[in-house]
Image (tube, grey):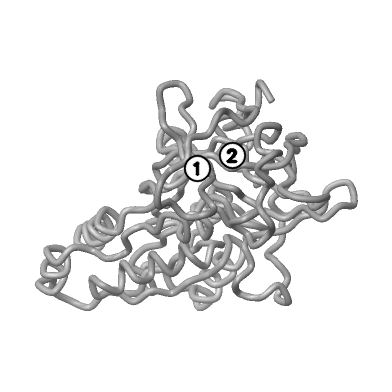
Amino acid sequence: MAGVLDSVNQRTQLVGQNRLELLLFRVRGQQVYGINVFKVKEVLACPRLTALPHSKATVRGVAHIRGETIPVIDLAMSIGLPGIPEEKVATSFVIITEYNRKTQGFLVDGVDRIVNLNWEDVLPPPRAAGKNVYLTAVTNIDEKLVEIIDVEKILSEVAPLAEDVTEELRTRSAQRQGHQLPVLVVDDSAVARRQIEHCLAAVGMDVVTRNDGREALNFLKGLTSDGSNIRDHLSLIISDVEMPEMDGYTFVTRCKESPELRDAFILLHSSLSGVFNQAMVKKVGADDFVAKFSADELAERVMQIIDEG
């Protein structure tokens, strides 16, 4: 799968066009799954794995790749399917990804191809799928259903992140003066929304959530339909980047084009590469970027934004 990643300059052409590239793959059987190419560092034939004592069953071992030790997670097992049989591991593939400032590999049966599509064609999972489904979205490609994996949910179960802020930050928050307007959090992952809400509630902030950019934009237009400014309603907006129907970059662009919404402080909060996102913040007109997920860093930055007003 050489050449999976294009240069940053080429990939940024998708930004502001509400488009994405998906790497398609299979974990068991014929069901096709997808992952955003922006998260993929490399795809390779499964290297030799070294067992990791006391690890969860979903972690099939660690691989030593280019001087880095990377945990390899059986993606099928992580979403409730039978794991890849031991005798088939050597002929499987590993998708090396970067999420939440960490690198990990996902063991899959096979890798298909990369497709370019519009976020408007990517929809939230059907309600019938339930709350515990390991998907953030679905789409149709060549008349086949493609399921987009909620990697943040998988990682939260394999290696949970610390969601609590330090006592020092809680104390500082208690000493702050004045009434604070709510913070709007826009993220398609229920796990990510819960993490952010828990983090901000710990420092005394009210949080409103929406699941994607289109839903959030409609909410904001409703708040300001009387001609008021969005700063009369919200302290700031924290938005993910990868979201069905309307991504975070397009959401920012739409807000900054609107007289009622352009004054909103929009903080992009994504597990995508920080270097890539710093370029995108400037391109789409967002006000800041914080990489997922550090409870202390996010809470401290939000308090600073509000205090600087």
Residue at numbered disc 2: 15
Q: Residue at x 73, y 35 (%)?
A: 114
Looking at the rendered structure, the kind of residue marked 2 is Val
Residue at numbered disc 1: 284
Q: Earlier in the sequence, mark 1 or mark 2?
A: 2
**139 relative position to 104: left or right:** right
How many numbered marks have been drawn onto this rendered protein structure? 2
Q: Position of residue 199 (x, y in %)?
A: 31, 67
* Secondary element type, mark 1: helix
Q: Residue at x 62, y 37 (%)?
A: 37
Q: Residue at x 56, y 62 (%)?
A: 188
* Secondary element type, mark 2: loop
Looking at the rendered structure, the kind of residue marked 1 is Val
Q: Residue at x 24, y 57 (%)?
A: 296
Q: Examine the image and state in which quarter residue 137 appears.
A: bottom right
Please say if 4 is above or below 25.
above
Please say if 187 is above or below 74.
below
Q: Residues within 10 Å of mark 1 (few under 14, many from 20)?
A: some
**300 relative position to 131: left or right:** left
Q: Residues within 10 Å of mark 2 (few under 14, many from 20)?
A: some
> How far, Cα to Cα, is label 1 from label 2?
8 Å
Q: Nearer the viewer, residue 220 or 186?
A: 186
Q: Position of residue 118 (x, y in %)?
A: 72, 47
Please say if 68 is above or below 59.
above
Q: Position of residue 213 (x, y in %)?
A: 57, 60
Quadrant holding the C terminus: bottom left
Q: Position of residue 60 (x, y in %)?
A: 54, 44
Quadrant holding the N terminus: top right
Q: Nearer the viewer, residue 80 or 218?
A: 80
Q: Are marks 1 and 2 in contact (CB under 8 Å)?
A: yes
Q: Nearer the viewer, residue 256 or 188?
A: 188
